Amino acid sequence: MKATPYHHGALRDALLTAAETILQRDGLLALTLRAAAREAGVSHAAPGYHFGDLPGLLTALAAVGIRRLSTQLRQIKSSPDRRTWDAARAYLAFARANPALFQLMFQSDRLQPDNPSLVEARTEAMQQLARTRGIDDQEFSVAQLGHLTGGWAIAHGFATLLLDGRLAPLLGTMPPGSTPEDLFEAMLASAEKGLIGQN
Amino acid sequence: MKATPYHHGALRDALLTAAETILQRDGLLALTLRAAAREAGVSHAAPGYHFGDLPGLLTALAAVGIRRLSTQLRQIKSSPDRRTWDAARAYLAFARANPALFQLMFQSDRLQPDNPSLVEARTEAMQQLARTRGIDDQEFSVAQLGHLTGGWAIAHGFATLLLDGRLAPLLGTMPPGSTPEDLFEAMLASAEKGLIGQN
DNA sequence: CAAACTATCTAGACATTGTAAAGATACCTT
DNA sequence: AAGGTATCTTTACAATGTCTAGATAGTTTG
């Protein structure tokens, strides 16, 4: 076991770990093929062997994130004693815990749209989402579709707006010490009343 | 008026137009300083003079988009005869008409966070959004904040998921010929019932 | 009206990146 | 042991962001 063996042995996983480190530490724009190679201590062209190109690396990392989210969603109890918004809360918690990864997962112009691993991860995550909204079968009514889409959209919209910094002005008007989660709960309370109340 | 005068005269606006053309035609990743210069027929370093760097150009373009959205929102009637979801529909319509621009507007890691023009445009857009939700004053109750955030999040979430291609599987289960707007309306109908119904 | 001044654009240069091609090294099968 | 294959390195090149210096055209000022 030399200090720097020619053959790494598990370079693909090491590169994914290095890539996520860079993503968290320096942001998506700093996550380049060469930066991942430097972080992993290999030559600059090594990532190309395992991932083909930069979209290939980003896609593999996004798939890791989606599977991680799926695992979180899988923890949520099914009916009858599940709470309506537990999936939404888990969705936000994931986005808050993995902000840059979450944003990468939904940055489709940087990903390979037909990557089998990515498509499979997305399908599984979608099924988990549907399950938490009480939809287990494959056939949806339009009303069920609206219900599922609404739950996803309101959680996803809040998470993306928050990570993007767009909710900061609103948070600034809340009582001191308020967290994004407090605003999230206020939003959910409003949603249960139909989102149409005046105040 | 020569064919290619040394001084363009209105190069800044021409570069913004060129940039939006590239954005629509080739996507965000193809929108580079040099591509904008080529599209406008000037030297590769000309955009640097007007916008400083690439984030400067993208920020200026994002501000254009935000002001355009503000204008759309301003058309929406205030109470009492406004319809609850007209702002959400206008929000989606804008995102559908300007998909790449909409995505750029919310891609904060590519923008200059403190750019005065951008900040001002965002503030104005936010006020329009609040107005369409029946909130005109500066002081919000927490319930009002939840109401405002919910309306924004559900529209924004739907728009981003749709543009990202994430709603395609759901649209595929709808009756043939269904549009994204149909799913949007189904979602809004569910939202008015509290997003908690089973079907 | 001319000269100085400033704003606007071009030309050249360099570091960084993605990516392809060819070579080197280690593992693996037989 | 030998050949074959997988894994990684080295080399090379085009594209980009961005800096610097230079060229050109308005604009102001005497």
Image (tube, coloured by chain):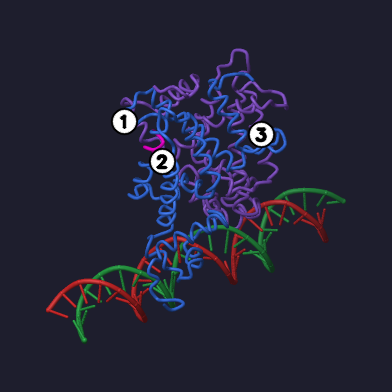
Chain colours: A purple, B blue, C green, D red
Q: Any mark on residue B137, and which?
A: 1
Mark 2 lies on a secondary structure that is helix
Q: Nearer the viewer, residue A119 or A38?
A: A119
Q: Quadrant of the N terminus of chain B?
A: bottom left
Can residue B148 be found in the magenta stretch? no
How far apart marks 2 and 1 lie (CA) works out to: 16 Å
Q: Which residues are magenta?
A: B125-130
Q: Amino acid at mark 2?
A: Arg
Q: Any mark on residue B74, and which?
A: 2
To the question of a shared chain for discs 1 and 3, the answer is yes
Q: Amino acid at mark 1?
A: Asp
Percent across and percent down for residue B63 are 41, 50
The answer, for residue A44, to whether it is visible in the render is: no
Q: Which residue is mark 3?
A: B170
Callout in the foreground (1, 3) = 1
How many residues crowd mark 2 within 10 Å: few (<14), some (14–19), many (20+)? some
Percent across and percent down for residue B15 are 44, 62
How far apart marks 1 and 3 lie (CA) works out to: 39 Å
Q: Quadrant of the C terminus of chain B?
A: top right
How far apart marks 2 and 3 lie (CA) works out to: 32 Å
How many residues crowd mark 3 within 10 Å: few (<14), some (14–19), many (20+)? some
Callout in the foreground (2, 1) = 2
Return the chain for callout 3: B
Residue C20 in the figure: left or right of residue A90:
right
Mark 3 lies on a secondary structure that is helix
The answer, for residue A30, to whether it is visible in the render is: yes
Which residue appears at 44% of the width and 37% of the height? B76
Does A48 sit above or below residue B130? Answer: below
